Image: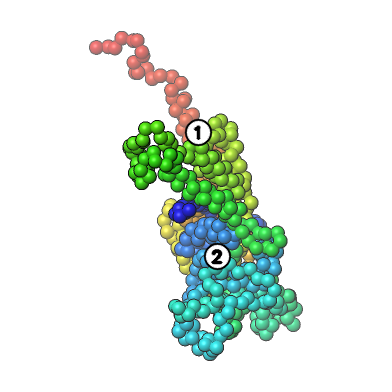
Amino acid sequence: MGIQPLTFNKILPRLNNVAGMEVQTRTKVTFRARSYDKKEKDTAEALSDLAMFVQDKNNSTHILSHVGHDARVCGLGWHEFDVQDGVIREGRSDPLLTIPDLADRTPGLTEQRFVGKGCWMPKDLVKQKWSDADVDAAQWGFAMPFGGEAYCPVTTCGGYMNDETQMVFVVEWSMRIPAKYYEVIDRSNRLVTTFDKAEAKAIAARPQYKNITEKQGYKIVFVYFTGNVLLEVLEDSYQLNPAKGLFLLTPTVCFRDNDTGAPFGLVRNAIDPQRRYNKTKTRLTWLMAAHQVIMDGDAADAQSVRDEAARPDGVLVVKAGKQLNINRHEQAIAQHLAALDSDDKDIQAALGIYDESLGIETNANSGIAIQKRQLGSSRNMAMVIDNALAAKKRWAEKLLYLIQSVFTEQTAFWVMDDAGEVKQLVLNQPELDAQGNPVKDKNGRPVLKYDIKTPVYDTYVEEVPDVASQQEVARDMVIQALPSIGGLQNLTPGFLELLGVPQTSKLMQEVTDGVPQKLAAANAAAEAAAKNSVGGLVPTNTPQLGAPIAA
């Protein structure tokens, strides 16, 4: 009909609403010791301080929020770790250029054989970076490796070469290859894992290498290629967990198709009603602006009628005895408005996010009806949020392994203390005796304080509010708990430990020393003394109320 199509995106504000709820409830992760061993607690607290430091420097919560939003839109969001010059970095990988292994049918894609990540690079740069590869001889037709049906969300290219821009599509495949690895107890009684048997023997405690255990695990290898040309094969420098074979890429899954395993987001189910809404809205806009004239052939000049009928203040002069009627499409407009409302409701139902959760006025008149629809939106998002939390746990596990792999030497960083002041925390620092000499173990090796190189298997991940330090977490928890326990004097070390207050904090030390109880007793004694002075005998030289005062 020559009508310009209109687009009214009803999906975006609802997805933004879910993103807003997630942003307002962001959390960070810390590590807690399961046992009561003091050294293990101290190590877990050091790991937590360092994890807070890394998350703060990388703005991790912001990146994870974007990854979660990608998952709700595309079905998959990707968080990526990287280590550059000994610094842990985080980022978001483009969900349209990252390719999962759909043969892995686990809900969270936790058993992938490979993950592909693509990027466009200038052809000259590719030839310079991989000078040994014959890029000019490449077959540029788009194909997937590993055989079988493959899911590829790469929508920005039909092949590996763009002749117009001379850009080449390079894919980095992270591959999980079965490999033997060795667990060995070294001379400092620490558990070490390695893929090299000779290295295991070299670091093993004597005699006869009896403490070396051979196990079957996985090694991560990077394979770079473009078209049908192999560019490079590298082993990952940070084998995070040989038993599992963890990639530096962590997927967040929204939903997966039962038949194909392909991921999909909240948008998929709402596409059809959104298209119907836009078509209906386009026709409605045209109907409201158009008028139809029905008249006898010579009732008036046709062009004049057309011009005047389109004007809100138009004047039509009709010949006597002739008929002229203007149809303003009232019935069709009413039908389109009803269809528009139906399409809008279909979009809400498909997304599971109703207008009430956005604060939009609806036909729900009672408070109970509004509350039920708001609750319905929250419950519809429960599985999506749960999948995101599961991915965050896997991300935190990789963060722990990376911290233990990267910070292997004596390292100093800055944390916030009880008073809100910045202090220095040193990892892998030799412990000193009263004379200032390094403390050594029975094998003559220095005993390290905050030795995070040793795997802490009794450490678990805990989510805390999005704050800059553990001290802020502890402060908020204690303040919330005080009214219910009856004041500071009822704090105990065990209760503070349950709240997650660091063992090294000033508050924990004061409670352990009984400072709150001593202050409470002193205050009670002072109040009792004050009451006795008021209720006791009044000195004789003090005038009594109503008594005459001597001149």
Q: Is residue 178 positioned above or below 547 on the image?
A: below
Q: Is residue 83 in sight in this rendering? A: yes
Image quarter of residue 229: bottom right
Question: Which label is found at residue 524?
Answer: 1
Q: Is residue 341 found left or right of 241 in the rendered image?
A: left
Indicate the amino acid at tag 2.
Pro
Residue 231, x across and y down, in percent: 56, 84
Q: Residue at x 50, y 66 (%)?
A: 91
Q: 58 or 24, which lies in front?
A: 24
1 or 2: tag closer to the N-terminus: 2
Please name the residue shown 52% across and 77% down the image: 169
351, above or below 106, in the image = above
**Image quarter of the C terminus:** top left
| Classed neighbour count for the residue bearing mark 1: other residues with Cα under 10 Å, few (<14), some (14–19), many (≥20) | few
For label 2, the SS is loop
**Residue ID for mark 2:** 95
Residue drawn 54% across the image and 68% down it: 155
Where residue 406 sits in the image (x, y, percent)?
54, 72
Q: Secondary structure at mark 1?
A: helix
Kind of residue at badge 1:
Ala
**Whole-percent x, y for residue 422 in the image:** 42, 59
Residue depicted at 47% across the width and 40% down the height = 329
Asked whether 516 or 190 is in front, the reply is 190
Q: Nearer the viewer, residue 545 or 143?
A: 143
Marks 1 and 2: CB-CB under 8 Å? no
